[in-house]
Amino acid sequence: MRTRPMTAAIAATLLWFGPRAALADSAADARMAAMEARITQLEDKLATSQKTIDEQSELLKQQATPAVSQGTAAPASGLDAFLNTVQINGYVAASYEYSFNNPNNPIGANATNQFNLDHNTFNLDGAKIELYRPATNPGDAGFQLDLLFGADAGVAGGYRFTTPGFAADNFSYVQDMNIQYNWDNVLFKFGKWETLLGYEVFDSVANKNITHGLLFTYAIPLVHTGLQASGKINESFGWAGALVNGWNNATDTNDNKGLLGQLNYSGGPLTTALNMYYGADGNTGFSGQTVEHAGSDPAIVLDWNANFAANDALTFWANADWGLQKNVVFVSGPNLGRTIDSVWYGLALGTQYAFNDKTSLAVRGEYLRDADGYRILVGKNTNAYSLTATLAYKLTTNLLARAEFRYDALTSDGNGDHFFPSGGPSDLSNNNYQGLVQVAYIFD
């Protein structure tokens, strides 16, 4: 029978494979246990390494970064922390100017302007770097250093009038340089700074028009060197006062000092200030055709300015000035030999409308009377008029392009009512029409 041998074969096979299967299972279990032990060992090492990394990172955070100038082994310094408190601002501006009187000689064709003087000229207006650390809180100390380069620097420093115009881009000028300290919310400035008077400021890019107005040029001082203090009376009213060398002079020209004062208000849409200058430094004359009694006779200027924001798009502003210089001795012109208390006064009105966040139009109208020809030019009953329109467009957040048209007129007894170069070398006009284009990159 074949059944019995088959049964025996099956039994033999089972007896042979059974122990071997058991051995295989046992080996697999051993390998699995070894792998689990290895994984546990690796996890322990990883946890130890991560702990070491965390401890080292914490130690690095507690140590200051060494100054680069000291090398990697130098002790830690507060230079980086200090630099983080310094603001770096400024601008680079260039322009093109054209006088429609088309004078034969382009130099000084637009003489009623402070900075934009020449006809048919591409101009490097200015490159300014401003370093400023504000003394915001009581006990804080700070400083301001403004360096200006280019044609505007040559005018501000007085070099433009003694050096050919083609070299004007080589000039440099320290616009502001002062040390500041906040004493119980009273801010002290010691050094050189821009005047408190006037609506417009020194930097053209910060004004609504490219050219500076008649009042900025002829009615007020621009800079002072001395000690200034300012503070707040309450949330709306503020004050400022200063003791200075005088009018636009870094070095005192005599034994007298000038005084500055300001009362200002800011609330809602209105910002306004009443300013005063009083001093006797013999530096208020402009034409060089007059002298003062050894600079010992006082001058006084009263200045008022206001800005009113009617809404987000429309702004109005105004500026008025009245000035007096005592005992002016005239050495030429129709007042030759006379000693006069010379008076000047003027009014500027302006508005700006923003069509959108990129495009705006500003218009400024001005009148200035120089009764004795002391501030503008030699003559009597001198009157100056100016009308300016400026279209501005922001190409980018920092790049500003502006186009401007300006009209100026001068009338003066004893001067023939002709002052502006026009046509040939001997041709003069009492009117001037000027066009400008300016592009400025402003960084802050």
Image: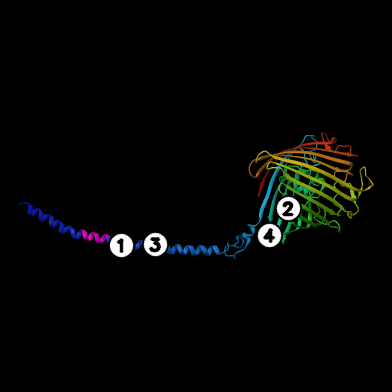
Between disc 2 and disc 1, the foreground one is: 2
Residue type at mark 3? Glu
Residue at the disc numbered 4: 137
Of pointers 4 and 1, the one earlier in the residue sequence: 1
- Identify the secondary structure beneath mark 3: helix
Residue 199 shows up from this direction: no
> Left of 75 or right of it: where is 16?
left
Q: Are marks 4 and 1 in contact (CB under 8 Å)?
A: no
- How far is the residue under mark 3 from the one under mark 1? 15 Å
- Identify the secondary structure beneath mark 2: loop
Residue at the disc numbered 1: 33
Residue at image location 51% in from the left, 62% down from the top: 57
Range of the magenta residues? 21-28
Q: Nearer the viewer, residue 30 or 262?
A: 262
Q: Main secondary structure of the magenta part?
A: helix
- Identify the secondary structure beneath mark 4: loop
- Identify the secondary structure beneath mark 1: helix
> Left of 43 or right of it: where is 181?
right
Of pointers 2 and 3, the one earlier in the residue sequence: 3
Residue type at mark 1? Ala
Of pointers 2 and 1, the one earlier in the residue sequence: 1
Residue type at mark 2? Ser
Residue 353 spot, x, y in % from top left? 70, 39
Residue at the disc numbered 3: 43
Of pointers 3 and 4, the one earlier in the residue sequence: 3
Q: Quadrant of residue 428?
A: top right
Residue at the disc numbered 2: 236
